[in-house]
Image (cartoon, grey):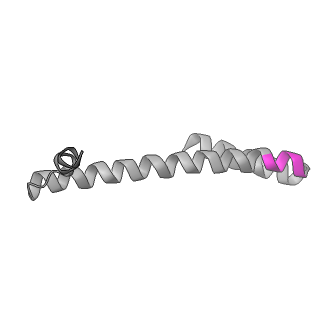
């Protein structure tokens, strides 16, 4: 979250100054948001897998291992 805030700050400062300065903050924001979305999706998948295993006795990893 702190890195994203810093990237937004860099984008804003670059927006005021020039196009080249704007692109640095924009690209940094895109990279950080991509990482945050990936980590959030992985966390959600882990939570769903855990809940399915705990409450419905359905193990996704066990099913995957049987397929392989």
- Answer whether residue 44 is magenta in the image: no
| Residue 20 magenta-highlighted | yes
Outermost residue on the bottom side: it is 56
Picture mark count: 0
Q: Residue at x 78, y 52 (%)?
A: 12
The residue at the point 32 percent across, 53 percent down is: 45
Q: Measuring 80% from the left and 49% from the top, which residue is drawn there?
A: 23
Q: Nearer the viewer, residue 66 or 28?
A: 66
In the image, the segment drawn in magenta is 19-23
Relative to residue 9, is residue 44 drawn left or right?
left
Answer with the quarter of the image where residue 56 lies.
bottom left
Q: Position of residue 20 (x, y in %)?
A: 88, 47
Q: x%, y% of residue 27?
A: 72, 47
Image spot of residue 53 (x, y percent): 14, 51
Answer with left or right where residue 35 lies relative to residue 53.
Answer: right
Left or right for 20, reference 40:
right
For the residue pair 10 and 24, the one nearer the viewer reads as 24
Which residue is drawn at the image coordinates 47% and 49% (left, top)? 38
Asked whether 46 or 59 is in front, the reply is 59
- The secondary structure that most of the magenta stretch takes on is helix
What residue occupies the far right of the structure in this picture?
18
Q: Quadrant of the C terminus?
A: top left
Horizontal and vertical percent position of residue 67: 21, 49
In this rendering, position of residue 36 left or right of residue 25: left
Q: From the image, which quarter does the N terminus lie in? A: top right
């Amino acid at each position: 979250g702190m890195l994203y805030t810093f990237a937004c700050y860099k984008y804003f400062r670059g927006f005021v100054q020039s196009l080249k300065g704007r692109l640095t903050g924009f690209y940094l924001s895109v990279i950080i948001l991509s990482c945050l979305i990936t980590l959030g999706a992985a966390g959600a998948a882990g939570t769903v897998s855990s809940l399915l295993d705990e409450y419905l006795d359905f193990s996704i990893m066990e099913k995957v291992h049987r397929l392989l």
